[in-house]
Amino acid sequence: MSFQAYLDNIQTKTGKTPTDFKELASSKGFYLDGKIAPGIKATEITNWLKEDFDLGHGHAMAIYALLKGKKE
């Protein structure tokens, strides 16, 4: 599955766009100035996505990659 396909599936499931996830991550203190905030581990972000959005590990990692700077 391509990265874009992951993002499309996530948007279908959650109703959230990549920009929405960046804004939500920012409001939680995970994302700052266009990158993951210092000291934040992948597990913190993926656990949040799994708990709040019922994403599987692969889809949560796709959002993590997005926040790390992978292009949409």
Image (cartoon, helix red, strand yellow):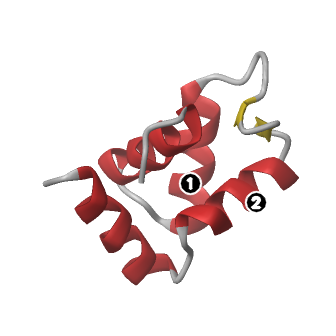
| Residue type indicated by callout 1 | Leu
Dot 1 alpha-carbon crowd within 10 angstroms: few under 14, some 14 to 19, many 20 or more: many
**Residue, disc 2:** 23
Q: Quadrant of the N terminus?
A: bottom left
Dot 2 alpha-carbon crowd within 10 angstroms: few under 14, some 14 to 19, many 20 or more: some
Q: Residue at x 55, y 30 (%)?
A: 43
- Count the labels in the image: 2
Q: Which mark is residue 71?
A: none
Disc 1 vs disc 2: which is toward the camera?
A: 2
* Residue 61 pos. (x, y %): 41, 41
Q: Residue at x 53, y 35 (%)?
A: 69
Corner quadrant of residue 42: top right
The image shows residue 5, relative to residue 41, as above or below, that is: below
Q: Residue furthest front?
A: 71
The image shows residue 64, relative to residue 48, as above or below, that is: above
Query: CA gap, disc 1 to disc 2?
Result: 13 Å
Q: Residue at x 18, y 53 (%)?
A: 2
* Residue 35 pos. (x, y %): 69, 32
Taking 40 as reference, is 32 left or right? right
Looking at the rendered structure, the secondary structure element under dot 2 is helix
Asked whether the beta carbons under mark 1 and mark 2 sit within 8 Å of each other, the answer is no
Q: Quadrant of the C terminus?
A: bottom left
Q: Which mark is residue 49?
A: 1
Q: Residue at x 78, y 18 (%)?
A: 38
Taking 66 as reference, is 8 left or right? left
* Residue 64 pos. (x, y %): 51, 40
Taking 68 as reference, is 2 left or right? left
